[in-house]
Amino acid sequence: AQSVTQPDIHITVSEGASLELRCNYSYGATPYLFWYVQSPGQGLQLLLKYFSGDTLVQGIKGFEAEFKRSQSSFNLRKPSVHWSDAAEYFCAVSARDDKIIFGKGTRLHILP
Amino acid sequence: KAGVTQTPRYLIKTRGQQVTLSCSPISGHRSVSWYQQTPGQGLQFLFEYFSETQRNKGNFPGRFSGRQFSNSRSEMNVSTLELGDSALYLCASSPDRVTDTQYFGPGTRLTVL
């Protein structure tokens, strides 16, 4: 069955620290992979996506994600978080002309 | 360019009623998708419309339906509302496919009493 797992419901990091949010997927076809962020008052916004090519993908706001086919993972990283990064982050998977499946989300808290 | 707009932003209904939500996509976008977001189930795909045709559908009962007009505006309808239908309903538009960059609207918060 197609699914996306974000094992961490909440993550707390200190401002300036590095961040890694985990995402594992199960999908039969070659997947498109996405990370979205949802902030209060900002709505849901695409951070980055991957389909093919370089397995390290750069996104907006200084985020990057690495696709590891052998581990069925697409983890999101940021070298130094800012207080404004506090939000909920969703990993998602799809294929061309297929529906999109979201993970349950990881809420990121930032300590000053 | 104007973003995705959704109306109304908030709605309160009672069980058994029906509701229609509206979504206006970004100009030039032909794909419109709808999602239901709840604390328990997270973000779930309802359906996608392209050129007035439903292209994909999620695992929701037939009480949930939608349509798309020739100007790409879309509506979704929920009939015979249940308490569990209380959710944030999000609409997203993209140029052609859900795998393109989707732009989300602010959502309609539906409360069923």
Image (tube, coloured by chain):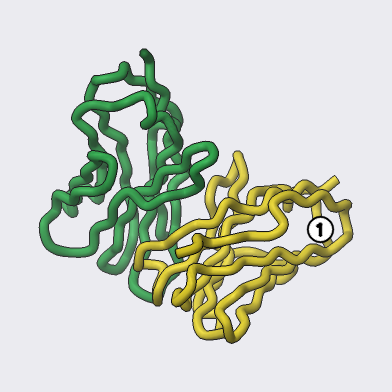
Quadrant position of the C terminus of chain B in the picture: top right
Image coordinates for residue B24, horizontal then vertical, percent:
59, 68
Q: How crowded is mark 1: few (under 14 residues within 10 Å), some or many (20 or more)?
A: many
Q: Residue at x 63, y 60 (%)?
A: B6
Left or right: B91 with respect to A20?
right
In the image, A101 versus B4, the foreground residue is B4
- The tint chain B carries is yellow
In the image, A62 versus B56, the foreground residue is A62
Q: Which residue is drawn at 66% across and 74% down?
A: B66
Query: What chain is colored green?
Result: A
Q: In the rendered image of this protein, does residue A21 appear above or below residue B52?
A: above
SS at circle 1 = loop
Image coordinates for residue A28, horizontal then vertical, percent:
32, 65
Q: Residue at x 30, y 19 (%)?
A: A15
Residue type at mark 1: give it: Leu
Residue on which the image places disc 1? B81
Q: Which chain carries label 1?
A: B
- Which quadrant of the structure image shows residue A7? top left
